[in-house]
Image (cartoon, rainbow, N blue to C red):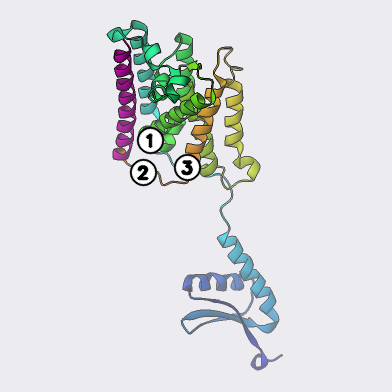
Amino acid sequence: MSPEATVWVVVHETADARHASEAALVLTALEIQHERRMYRNRWQLSVAEQDAARASEEIRAFDAERHAPPVGRKPIAELGNGWNGVAAFAALLLVFAILQAQDVLGLDWVRAGRLDAGRVLGGEWWRAVTALTLHADLGHLASNIAFGSFFGLYVGRYLGSGLGWSAILAGGILGNAVNAWIQPASHLAIGASTAVFAALGLLGAYTWRRGFLRNTPWRDRIAPVTAAVFLLAFTGTGTGTGDGNVDVMAHLTGFAAGFGIGVWLAASRIPEGVRAQQIAAAISACVLAGAWLAAFGAAVIAR
């Protein structure tokens, strides 16, 4: 067929000059003769009729590859090193352990602050907070500091120490409140473990929804959740600690609360900057202080 008799067919049209150039490069690489021109403010690529089907298919394949999400691991953005929050967490629990052991201010700290399901449902809301700062013995305290520091370190790295530990505290409080609602009215409990497992649930959910495995096959993507559930089963039931006096329900409710918070935070815009972290930390400090002030007031009235 002579050049004069060649029928040209438009195989691609776009208003984006860069995209038109890229499509033209595809055809050039395939040694498909083509023509590019502007028509009514849009770029058109034309090829000989006999090359039209092949050219259209190759351009479609190129577009599909260009718009496909990246496959593979990607790092999670970190907002801090996490250690400031860990140090504050450990220091806080140690200070309260001393206050509790010495009956400072003549207060029975355990009686005033423990989770008492009947009293919580009766309006003593602060017990869902204060119970997180009390422990039965040194072993109980040490295990919660160890596990809480490990999980909280990574939460603090991804969310910042202020926001991260505020989220952990919120998960612990919510977990304790739900535990009090589920348990019999006579149920009593103390310990930071509800918040510790809230940290585990939060970490698993956040890395699942926003993590470095997001663009991998689904079996890889759910690995953080699988790992978190395994750790919950191993440590949250006492299997990994050898402790038979374990409030399994508190661990489950803390984990569930933290998991829900983690999913929510993963879908949210995390505020950056020192100021936001300081505000979050200040709010948490106020919540703890307010809860213990309420506990003091109730204890004084009860005397």
Relative placement, left or right, of 283 versus 190 is: left
Q: Name the spot of residue 44 as percent of width and height, x first.
A: 54, 80
Residue that badge 3 annotates: 264
> Which secondary structure class fits the magenta region best?
helix
Please check the rendered image and state whether residue 97 is part of the magenta-colored stretch, yes or no: no
Find disc 1 in the rendering and name its residue.
163
Residue that appears at 59% across and 70% down: 26
Of marks 3 and 1, which one's residue comes earlier in the chain? 1
Can residue 287 be found in the magenta stretch?
A: yes
Q: Are marks 3 and 2 in contact (CB under 8 Å)?
A: no
| The disc label shown at residue 271, or none | 2
Position of the N terminus, as image quadrant, is: bottom right
Q: Nearer the viewer's eye, disc 3 or disc 2?
A: 3
Q: CA distance from mark 3 to mark 1?
A: 13 Å
Secondary structure of the residue carrying numbered label 1: helix
Of circles 3 and 1, the one toward us is 3
Q: Quadrant of residue 97?
A: top left
Q: What is the quadrant of residue 226 in the picture?
A: top right
Looking at the rendered structure, the secondary structure element under dot 2 is loop
State which region is magenta. Answer: 275-303
